[in-house]
Image: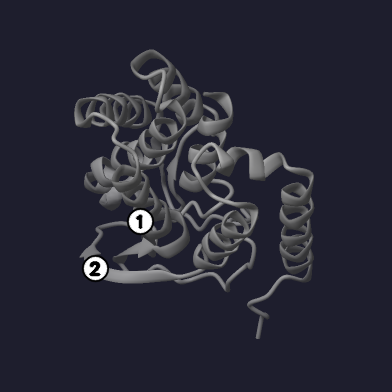
Amino acid sequence: MRSPFSPFYFLFFLGLLLWITFSIKLGLIALTFQKLGLDPESALTLLITSLLGSAINLPLFTLRVSVPPPPVEGIGYGLLRRPPVPFTGRTQVAVNVGGCLVPVLFSLYLIKSYSIPPLQIIAATAFVASVSYFMSRPIPGVGIGMPILVAPLSAALAAIFLSEEYRAPLAYISGSLGVLIGADLLRLKDIRRMAAPIASIGGAGTFDGIFITGLVAVLLS
């Protein structure tokens, strides 16, 4: 039986945790979260929670799909490689903890903590969602794909244009929620075309998906 853990990805996982800690001590990531009102310890906790949560998918419902595509091999997503899940004609729709729930909850925290005008939040999020929708594509057997820098740049530009005082939290909120809405929720109609065993909302994970979009957007804003 094939082991569900890849030694390479496990070492990468440990190395990434060390890099996070080292970066925070140097002030790189701490500077990002300082703009959002978090101290280094809180930033580290949030990052690790998101990283570990990216491996957890909470099932919502299943859909029947007509014809599965050829199996996709050799694509390494996530930090731990799970055994390939056989496609049986049904796609399980789930929500990812690290790539969806954590960024959404932190965005709600920022909305509550800062007095950002609601119209600015709606406008920035709608802009990022629109860009994410038109730049994302369903990949058969895999999921939704999108160039990684498109969303952060869009969120940063929206925050710079719409707000001088709240550009950092606005960049994170619009970057995280915009990708979630545009590249995931609005793409639910494409699930049957993907014919993947699992379609996870926010399932790109922490550092290669929604969460990193928010962080990069803050740095660019």
| Secondary structure of residue under mark 2 | strand
In this rendering, which labeled residue sits more in front, label 1 or label 2?
1
Please, which residue is most extreme toward the top here? Answer: 161
Residue underneath mark 2:
62
Residue type (three-letter) at the residue carrying disc 2:
Thr
Please, which residue is most extreme toward the bottom here? Answer: 1
| Residue 31 falls in image quadrant | top right
Which sits earlier in the primary sequence, circle 1 or circle 2?
2
Residue 201 visible in the displayed image: no
23 above or below 154? below
- Identified at 37% across, 59% down, the residue is 101
Residue 59 image position (x, y, % from top left):
31, 71
| Secondary structure of residue under mark 1 | helix
In the picture, measured across the screen, residue 141 lies left or right of residue 105, that is right
- Identified at 25% across, 48% down, the residue is 188
- Tell me if mark 1 has few (under 14), some (14-19) or many (20+) residues whose alpha carbon lies within 10 angstroms of its own: few
- Tell me if mark 2 has few (under 14), some (14-19) or many (20+) residues whose alpha carbon lies within 10 angstroms of its own: some
| Residue 42 falls in image quadrant | bottom right
Residue 1 image position (x, y, % from top left):
65, 86
- Identified at 20% across, 26% down, the residue is 119
Residue 36 image position (x, y, % from top left):
49, 41
In the picture, measured across the screen, residue 38 lies left or right of residue 139, that is right
